[in-house]
Amino acid sequence: NVVTAMLKSADRVVAQSNDTKRNAYTYYKIDRPIEVIPLGIKKPVFERKRRTDFGLSDDEIVFCTIGRLVKRKNIDDICSVLSHLKNDYSFKFLIIGDGPERGHLEALKVKLNLDDHVRFLGNATDEEKFQILALSDFYLSTALHEGFGLVFLEAMECGLPIVCYDRGGQNDFLISGKTGYLVELGNKDKFRSR
């Protein structure tokens, strides 16, 4: 295996998270030290916007998520969770990003009667992304796995509480109940209660 040979012959091996480090040991069976060097983000510079600039109301809850629309991001679970809240809360769920799952997710939005609640914003510039994060109330992620999860740092930079599944590199810096809410992978009932 080329990757195993590379990992064994490299001067040093580093990982972005303890999760990535564990996966390297598990999948590539290497027997050498791996150092963890976490990723970081630059302090964002952006013009603040109001909710009305994006056609949003001040009296509704704004949830958002960011990512390529692929199966691994598992946005289906967020839609399922929100479909149980639509009769009790006024909210919008903003999806930043695009990808091959968009058609499926648009159909799911209709199937779950979330037409008035879910908006697909497509790809956004960094400034637009931070403008939306800054006016949101919660950052949601039901990704099946994140190697690190830079989007969590971006959401935290904007002061957002994060609700996400507990599988991936975000476990290094998201502490449930303190810096976010980590929910057991696939437990939509518990996710909804957060």
Image (cartoon, helix red, strand yellow):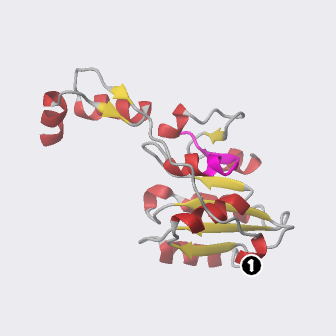
Residue 73 in view here? yes
The answer to whether 134 is drawn above or below residue 37 in the figure is below
The answer to whether 60 is drawn above or below residue 147 in the figure is below
Quadrant location of residue 175? top right
Position of 137 with respect to 162 (left or right) is right
Residue 167 in view here? no
- Tell me residue 2's x, y (percent): 12, 41
Amino acid carrying label 1: it is: Gly
Position of 194 with respect to 3 (left or right) is right
Q: Residues within 10 Å of mark 1 (few under 14, many from 20)?
A: few
Extent of the magenta region: 155-167
- Tell me residue 55's x, y (percent): 74, 79
Q: Which residue is mark 1?
A: 55
The answer to whether 52 is drawn above or below residue 61 in the figure is below
Helix, strand or loop under label 1: loop
Which quarter of the image is occupied by the N terminus? top left
